[in-house]
Every structure is written in C-alpha cells, then in structure tokens.
Image (cartoon, rainbow, N blue to C red):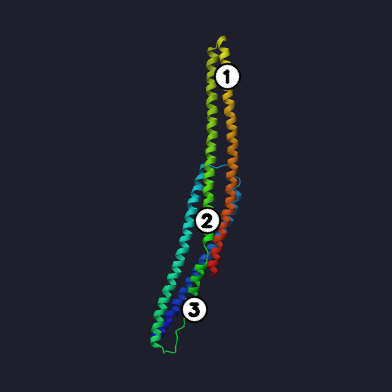
Amino acid sequence: MQRRLKTTQRKSMSKNVSKLVCRMGTMWERMGKQHENQWKMVQELIKISQSRNETSEDNHSNTKQLHVHVKMWCSGFQKLILHQKEYVKSLNNWLELNLMSIDNNLRDKASSQQKPQNPKIQSLLRTWQDQLEKLQEEGVKTAINTFAAAISTIIHYQSDEMQMKERCEETRREITRKSRKFEEWCDKQIAKRTPTDVVDDIEVIAEHQIVMEALKRRLEEEEEAYRRQCIKVKDKSLMNKKTGLSLVFAGTSERCRSLVFT
C-alpha cells in the first residue's frame, strides 16, 4: 500500500512538472511571436518617421525616454534569463530530493534485486537545465546595449541640432532688433535733419549696411549647418532603427525559439 502511494506521488509530481514545462514553452513561443509582430510594427513606424525633417522638443524627450527603457529592457532581460536558470536548477534539485526520499522508502520495502527506475521527468529537467546553460544570451544583450549606445549618440546629435536651431533664431532676432533700431534712428534723423548732417548720416548708414550684411551671411551659414545637421540626425536615426532593432528582435526571437524547442 505504501509503495503504491509513493508511486502515485511520483507520477503526480512528474505530471505537474510536465505541465509546467509545457506552459513555460508556450510562454516563450508567445513571446517570440510578439517580438516578430513588434518588428513588423517597427518597420511600419520607420516608414512613417521618414517624413519628419527636424527634431522637436517632443522628439528629443521621446528619444531620451526610449534610451531609458532600452537600458531597462537589457537589465530585465538579463534578470529574466538568470532567474529562469536559477528556477530550473532549484526545481531540478527539489525533484531529486523528493525522488531520493521516495527511492529510499522503496528500497526498504523492495528486495535487493529490485532497482528503482528514474522517471522520465527527471531526465527532462536535467536536459532542460543543461540546455539553458548552453544557450548563449550574450548576443541578445550585446544587440540591446549596442542599440542603447546608438540611441545615446542620436540624443547628442539631436541636442546639437536644437542648439543650432536656437542660434539661427537668435541671429534672426538680432537682425530684427538692429533693423528696428535703425528705422527708429532714421525717423528721428528725418525729423531734425539739417544740411550739415547729411555726411554723418551717410557714414552711419554705411556702417549699418556692413553690420546687417555680416549678420545675414552668418544667418545663411547657420541655417545651412542646421539643415545639414537635420539630415544627419534623420539619416542616423533611420539607420539605427533599421539595423539596431533588427538585431535586437532577431536575437530575442531566436532566443525564444531556442527555449521553446528546449
């Protein structure tokens, strides 16, 4: 009777662990499909983002948030893999301890010629643990970290772009201020002008023209540099989205498939 009870316990244990393995496999399979769907969505977003020509405050803020979340993603991925390895290892140890207790009881009741058989679930868990240890997650971690580094670079490019835009706007404001000030001076001079003031006025006007021409040239140079920076940021962003995310989702999808087939 006791032997039958122990055998029933062993079968129940194996059945429960088998269910756990199947459900974890289903989890990784669904995660793999989600990563594949995410990559398809990213491809569509890349097409949409190609119409943007300059970085706004919202774009810059969103890029910073993306960088934070990608770093958290890498940390979470490492913890997930580590915890799964530890969990499977603990599960394997727990199963071995329980089977050892059952086998010892069976040996006490059985004849010396009978040898307890190891259940298939024990072999499955050992294989699962071995396969987990063999799987390489460094490729995925490297891909995520590389993508995070690329986003960090884009953030710096965007900052430079926004500073260039601010310099252009400041130069425009300076041109507007000097033009308004010159107009006010002209109005005052016309009201009180005498024949002897004409020579002095010509000199002031010539100086004003020189200053304004220099400011306009500076503005043209700043605007050209700003346009080049906008193109640079856009091209870098698109390139890193295509290559970086491609490597990330390819790695995570492959990792999920490996765990499903484990």
Name the disc covering residue 120, or none. 3
Crowding at label 3, few (<14), some or many (≥20) Cα neighbours within 10 Å?
Answer: few
- CB contact under 8 Å: marks 3 and 1: no
Residue 247 x/y as whole percent: 57, 57
Q: Which residue is mark 1?
A: 205
Residue 104 x/y as whole percent: 39, 83
Tell me the SS state at disc 3: helix
Residue at 43% x, 71% y is 91
Residue at 61% x, 50% y is 47
| Quarter location, residue 87 | bottom left
Crowding at label 1, few (<14), some or many (≥20) Cα neighbours within 10 Å?
Answer: few
The vertical placement of 155 against 260, above or below, is: above
Tell me the SS state at disc 2: helix
Which amino acid type is shown beneath numbered disc 3? Lys
Which amino acid type is shown beneath numbered disc 1? Ile
The vertical placement of 182 against 24, above or below, is: above
All told, the count of numbered labels is: 3
- Measure the C-alpha gap from mark 2 to mark 3: 38 Å
Nearest to N terminus: mark 2 or mark 3: 3
Residue 99 seen in the figure:
yes
Which amino acid type is shown beneath numbered disc 2? Ile
